[in-house]
Amino acid sequence: MGTRMEVAQLESRMNTEDYRKLQGLFLDPLGAPRSLSRTEFIHLAWSSVGRGSKEEYGLLFDSVVVTQEHRGLLLDVDAIKEEGRVDWGGLCSFLLLELSDKVNTRSSSVPCWKLPRTLTCPHRDPVQKVLHLQGSGQYLTVSKGGTVGLRDGEDMSLLHTHRLQNSTVTPKDLWVTDMVLLHNVHKIAVSFTSKEVCFYDILSKQAPSCKYKLQGLRFTPWCLDYWVDPSHPDQAILTIGDIGGQVTALHFTSAHISLFESLSLRTDSDSADIILWDEVIKGKHRSCYTVTHRAHAPAWVRKVHYLGSLEAFVSCSTRPQSSMVVGWREKESRSLRVTSFFTTRGVWDMDHHRGLNLIATAGVDHQVLLWNPCVTLEPVCVLSGHTSPVTAVRFMQTKQQLLSYSKDKVLCLWDVSSQLCVHRLADVFPKTQEDTHTLLFFHEERQLLLLSFNSLLLLLETVKEEKRSSSHEHPVTCVLYNSLFRQVVSGDSASSVICWLADTGQKVKQFHRCHGNAKISTMALDGTQTRLFTAGTDGEVKVWDFNGRCLHRMNAGLGQAVEISQVLLLKRSILVMGWERMLTVFRLHSFSQSFVEPSEWKGGVQHRSDVLCAAFQPPQTLVTGSYDGEIIVWNNSTEKALRKLRPHAEHQEGKKQLGLFPNSHIIVNCKAVSDNSSAITRLFFIPGRTPAAATTGCADLVSCGGSGVVRLWNTVHSHLVGQFTAHIGDLGSIVMTVSPCGKYLVTADREGTLKTWDIQHYCLDPDDRTTKEPPKLLRSFRPHLDRVTHLEMCFQGDRLLLLSASSDCSVALSYLPGDTVGLFGQEEQWCLERHGPLHPQQGPGQAGKTT
């Protein structure tokens, strides 16, 4: 601890120029990167930087080496092999990630989102930008067609709409590409495909009036950024990125007086002063000058940002060779020194964390990369977990956290210091086509997240945190009960597994980073209860003993990062599913090696969408459920598909309902708040209802998933016997479990609410009709504050226990039908012996009585 404190003191006394001097030490006389030994580093750093002592530089070197060995973050591969040496990337990684505690304010905290709210939207075409007006607290939106909407700062209600005037083009040809707020001069700058940037006054209570029109740009401007010098508000920079791969910065030297000079009386019908781009380039306006580079050509510049602390322009494109470019301003010069960063498929978006001095990039290759702007060879770290191109990234500046959004409508929250995904939101976004333009706006002060899906605006707000115990430091993804050890096993998004005593709630042991940085998505126990199977988003399933030793690694994703939703253990095989239309199967005879490859599923591809879950009933009946709501019944011995179950009638009814509003796309979109309304997330055979009983027509299978609906099926006759809405459909997908005695069904939603239903006699009588009446609701209770991710029911002796895992980082223990005992990890331990047994045939309030 003493070493870190002293290093932090040295680091806090160094400025940007000191770091540039340090960077130069890691270049040989020919300009090639090199690493330094301890002696070389101390001597060169002390003599070159001119501040600090040799002892402090020695402590800095030692801390970097220790951290590199622990994290494996050396960016120079040769330096890794050479013991006791440090390269520039390793030094930067240490300073950025290890010494960032000073700006860390509960970085691992996870927001609890309210239900998404669709906002009244005046736009008929895609929303291009959302701005927060700092003075009034209101919000401004602009669409591709030039419609501007002003929103209330408290409830986001629409106050006023206006269409921007631009006489240069006809209304049908007007196309806005971006908008920025010039807060120091009370204007907005709007870029158009007509190769111009217009400046509108927003102080007036009337509609925004155009003050200047900057015309004649060489290429169409695509993105804008505006920066004001906090110590000299007259000094400001407007940065323009265009479709020709060019980044141009307009430096305003007297912004408060005038952005441009009146060289002539050129005005147009909008009464705006015409400013010609060529005149600005040639320096005819003494109040501004330009600097530029074309490092992205021929690709479009997707995003630009000026970093005032580094005096550098950062931009990105989808061209791999110039995925990100930093243009450094040279001292007393108007030229830029350009450095380019390479990624495999380019970058859609980027953001900068001022405290950490990290740049995050949204990769077309599904990865989020964190970069030190001074290190071009390799990123500081790679955040893997998305399974489609990442389109937006936003840092939380007051925390070490990052939001990322991908094309498959998945929002991830990352903890930067641990490089882990701590929260994942995937099923609350509306149904849209693949090429939907999505904008992500985050107002950190209010913890308000606004997303646009073309013309649709969706608002996500957080609820205030309630102080309570937590079982894990990160969202819990799954929970199991080990009857052999009488322990509860839970896994989380930070790849940790914790074992708890069910009798007291006390932690027994914890295994860290079971899948490195990848989230544990699901777990399973073998029949002996001595082997634990964990599935990670890295595409692997690992087999562990309870001493924390990994026995086997199963290559489910074939080397790719995939989202595994279930691992089902059968007598001679293990089924893994979640990311493709066919089951991935591992034969037990293949486990002679530590690294196990999958075998071929004989039944081939039968589903039309990704298989998400499965259930097995002896001797040989297997059922699988998919993302599109289809269930297939298989003979597990032959691996042959026998029958398909699908609620066709309900789908036809849904289409007729949508047809009531043929001209109102907004109403249809508003109802589509779940991206997987048909998806089947859980399947269970109902205990006690044998295949022989199913021949009479009673329900033997229960399914749940999107829209809060539970369905009961007869798998022999392929008949939907009953269905009911267990939770409000707007809450998205639900999870469930069935008691071993077949009496209780428990369902849970994304608000943390659990419901216990009595299904002992539900759907037992054969009938050709599908019953819509729900079973008896015994209890509704809320042991969690956020989404329930997994439920597990089990007997411990004569007690029927319910375990629930949640995104609020807790694991709860309850008696059926709904008496919560406590949260694992809470300060006050419980004792199950003091709680009376609750037999499955007893009702609520009868705990303590015996039968």
Image (cartoon, grey):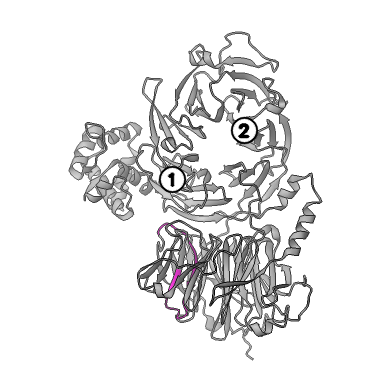
- Which of label 2 and label 1 is nearer to you? 1
| Along the viewing direction, whichever of 222 and 511 lies nearer the viewer | 222
Residue that protrudes farthest toward the right in the picture: 660
- Circles 2 and 1: CB atoms closer than 8 Å: no
Residue 159 image point, x, y percent: 73, 37
Residue 734 image point, x, y percent: 63, 64
Name the secondary structure under disc 2: loop
Determine which quarter of the picture holds residue 41: top left
In the image, residue 272 sits, relative to residue 421, either above or below, namely above
| Pointer 2 local density, CA inside 10 Å: few below 14, some 14–19, many at least 20 | few
- For the residue marked with disc 2, what is the amino acid? Gly
| Along the viewing direction, whichever of 641 and 355 lies nearer the viewer | 641
Q: Which residues are magenta?
A: 516-533
Examine the rendering and report whether any part of residue 50 can be seen: no
Return the residue at label 1: 369
Q: Which mark is residue 126?
A: none
Which of the two discs, 2 and 1, labels the residue nearer the N terminus?
2
* Alpha carbon separation for disc pair 2 and 1: 34 Å
Q: Which mark is residue 135?
A: 2
Task: Give yes or no for residue 522 being in the magenta stretch.
Answer: yes
Determine which quarter of the picture holds residue 443: top right
- For the residue marked with disc 1, what is the amino acid? Leu
Residue ID at (24%, 37%): 45
Residue that protrudes farthest toward the bottom in the picture: 851
Residue 606 image point, x, y percent: 59, 65
In the image, residue 846 sits, relative to residue 747, either above or below, namely below
Residue 127 image point, x, y percent: 65, 38
| Pointer 1 local density, CA inside 10 Å: few below 14, some 14–19, many at least 20 | many
Name the secondary structure under disc 1: strand
